[in-house]
Image (tube, rainbow, N blue to C red):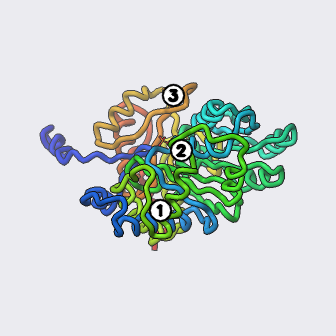
Amino acid sequence: MLPLFYIKRLQMKGRKLLMIPGPIEFEPDVMQAMAMATTSHVAPDFIEVFGNSLEHMREVWKSPKGQPFIVAGTGTLAMDMAIANLIEKDDNVLVISTGYFGKRFQDILTHYGANTTILEAPVGEVVPLEVIEKELKTKTYKALTITHVDTSTGVLVDPEPIAKLAKKYHVLSILDGVCSVAAETIHQDEWELDIVLTASQKAVGVPPGLALLMASEKAIQVWENRKTPVCNYYANWKNWLPIMKAYEARKPSYFGTPAVNLIVALETSLKIICKEGVQKRIERHQVLANAFRKGLASLHLEILPRSTEIAANSLTAVYYPKEIDGVALRSKIARSNVIIAGGLLSEIKTSYFRVGHMGSVSPNDLIAVLSALERALLALNYPFETGKSLNAFQTELLKFEE
Ligand SMILES: *Cc1c(COP(=O)(O)O)cnc(C)c1O
């Protein structure tokens, strides 16, 4: 047995591993980019960086025909921007909800005077397509919203068939991809999604502060043909569209000062993503997420999604075992310098935790999480065989290693 001071010394480095579903751990090159001397927003070098970022977005979103927007703000601003520009008072909008962020869409829509109908899936489930189609037949909808991965439940929705239904009924489709862009498969143009939006601090891998949005040609047309003015000043595309077009044409322009350093970091991260290859990156996320869940299953821990087919690549939401005090478990895990998130869905907030595994996530990170989890469970007398989750995780990974 080691004397206690040795154990303390093991922690001396004090570096914490951030495994929440955003902000995530960022690549060193991205952090380096953040630290460069801030240039003018109309400096030729920066214009080039902004232009490149817009072009790389099209590659990540698989939307060569889309109109990208990069605006200082959070993911919620991207949601706000989509609704403010496309929806007018008294428009009917269908909200397809798999958790907390579906309700946020309803909140924003209500704020702009839309008539919303919400289809809420039970916790851990998705709304069946038949239910969506049945609702679309009842009245003329202007748009529907989808949360690709709801970060409160870790449930993954397949947007493709829903986007098809939207087309069939001439309804705009708006995808909240805040927890999915660059981690889950998205083909915006092929699937004919009208809006796909995200924020910098999730799978795109840049510190918080950028709202990112891609609008289809159809979405821009619908905005151009509005009957009433956009009831939002900052988010109005009238202000931002000329700016995005100017940067892409490598010309100086100004509406509101862009977040210069964040955009330099964004270009760096998008280049890393494109260099890895979007498809390869998604596969890496998938392999790691599945292996992680094999580890959890080996400890008899239950995840929120009802089946692994609808479990996200980007995070996992896990119920605490019944006999375990969640607060004690999380604090013990934190003492191992692994930071995970608590629950978010108000009805069951205290009964589960969430682990983010997106962006630069590696097997090492998830081994660290499983190990910290096992040590915490051990300390709380949860009955299991030590090392079992590490074994299950590695066994699964070995299937994919050369
Ligand atoms: C994080 C998140 C948001 C909100 O993004 P903020 O940057 O916190 O405003 C919206 N939707 C989903 C799915 C998210 O994961």
Q: Position of residue 202 (x, y in %)?
A: 46, 50
Front disc: 2 or 1: 2
| Residue drawn 54% across the image and 44% down it | 235
Q: Amino acid at mark 1?
A: Leu
- Provide the residue designation for mark 2: 235
Q: Secondary structure at mark 2?
A: loop
Q: Is residue 124 left or right of residue 346?
A: right
Question: From mark 3 to mark 1, how far is it between C-alphas?
Answer: 31 Å
| Residue drawn 53% across the image and 50% down it | 239
- Provide the residue designation for mark 1: 397
Q: Identify which residue, 41 or 375, lies in the foreground.
A: 41
Question: From mark 3 to mark 2, how far is it between C-alphas?
Answer: 32 Å
Q: Position of residue 344 (x, y in %)?
A: 51, 32
Is residue 327 positioned above or below 95 on the image? above
Q: Is residue 166 left or right of residue 149?
A: right
Q: Secondary structure at mark 1?
A: helix
| Residue drawn 72% across the image and 50% down it | 225
* Other residues around mark 1 within 10 Å, as few (<14) / some (14–19) / many (≥20): some
Q: Amino acid at mark 2?
A: Ala
- Is residue 292 visible in the rendered structure shown here? yes
Is residue 61 positioned above or below 103 on the image? below
* Other residues around mark 2 within 10 Å, as few (<14) / some (14–19) / many (≥20): many
Q: Which numbered marker is on residue 349?
A: 3
Q: Identify which residue, 229 or 216, lies in the foreground.
A: 229
Q: Position of residue 261 (x, y in %)?
A: 33, 56
| Residue drawn 60% across the image and 65% down it | 62
Question: From mark 2 to mark 1, how far is it between C-alphas?
Answer: 44 Å
Dots 3, 2 in contact, CB < 8 A:
no
Q: Amino acid at mark 3?
A: Lys
Mark 3 or mark 1: which comes first in sequence? 3
